[in-house]
Image (cartoon, rainbow, N blue to C red):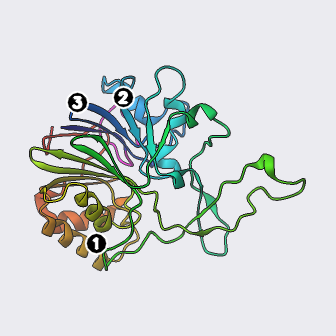
Amino acid sequence: MNARILADDRVRRRGLLAEHGLSILVETDGLRLLFDTGQAAGQVPVCLANARALGLSLASLDAIVLSHGHYDHGGGLAYLLTGGRVPPVHLHPDALKQRLAGPAAGPWQDVGLPWTTIDRPDLAEALVPNSGTRALSERVRLVAGIRTTAPFEAPSAGFWIRERDDPTSASPGEDPTRAAPTPDHFHDEQVLVCDTSLGLWIFLGCSHPGVASCVDAAMAAFPGRPVHTLVGGMHLGAAPVDRVRATARFLLDCGFRRVVPLHCTGLAATCSLMQELGDRCLPLCVGDSLEDGLPD
């Protein structure tokens, strides 16, 4: 097992780039998987630029996994799938809907994927929808359709979802985004779970349903197996201190040996997790890698 962070909100190595996004190259059980693709704010996605700087190739991927339908996780996909071999892209169908952020009465900001299958029909051919649990190999599974189950958690507030209408179907003078948005419960959130000799490695995109709820769903994919490493975004930046502490206690009770908070976890929450988890919590960032549970 090896996991290399290719995009994150922080960087400390010369020659590498940071952005508000997430991308992790995961190599395990004979598979090379790209978990999320960052946002691709420039011509070349940060994940690809960093991979090149690290001497890594993204040309021979077995699959790409999109954790959910936000720009900072799937924006780089349209560039990565331009020309050459196209690997399958696993995502929940709701990831393709319009995603918004803002107060209930608006105005809203579009935070969804910056491409559609109408604009890029070639992408549609690569997409593999997943609404539940899918095996990529005997020891690697995707878990989507996650519900918030932990009593101390709630789906991330201030996010909305609505059908992405085809503008060509609107009548003259009609608003093509006429459908009213509804609260986003992030049923499209998808986690990657890898069973290793040391235990389960679980990769999180943003944990919008809640960290504990995502971990519970991931553990259910391999019943009875111990956990080992948790990596990814935990969306605790605006969470009250009590929830962060409850999350830390939950992770300790689960038995995680390594917890790597990335991307949207938030600086204060990351510091709190480090206080609660001690040396089990690793504040890694772009360019860092984990192999067999230990940073290189």
Residue farthest along the left direction in this orientation:
198
The residue pinned by badge 1 equals: 244
Q: What percent of the width, then of the height, locates residue 269?
A: 30, 66
Q: Marks 2 and 3: which is nearer the front?
A: 3
Rendered view: 61 above or below 222: above
Q: Which residues are magenta?
A: 8-18
The residue type indicated by label 1 comes to Val
User: Residues under labels 1 and 2: Cα distance?
Assistant: 35 Å
User: Residues under labels 2 and 3: Cα distance?
Assistant: 11 Å
The residue pinned by badge 2 equals: 61
Q: Residue at x 41, y 35 (%)?
A: 47
Give the mark nearer the N terminus: 2 vs 3.
3
Residue farthest along the top direction in this orientation:
84
The residue type indicated by label 3 comes to Gly
The residue pinned by badge 3 equals: 30
Callout 1: SS:
helix
Frontmost residue, 138 versus 232: 138
Frontmost residue, 173 versus 288: 173
Q: What percent of the width, then of the height, locates residue 204?
A: 33, 54
Image quadrant in which you'd find residue 220: bottom left
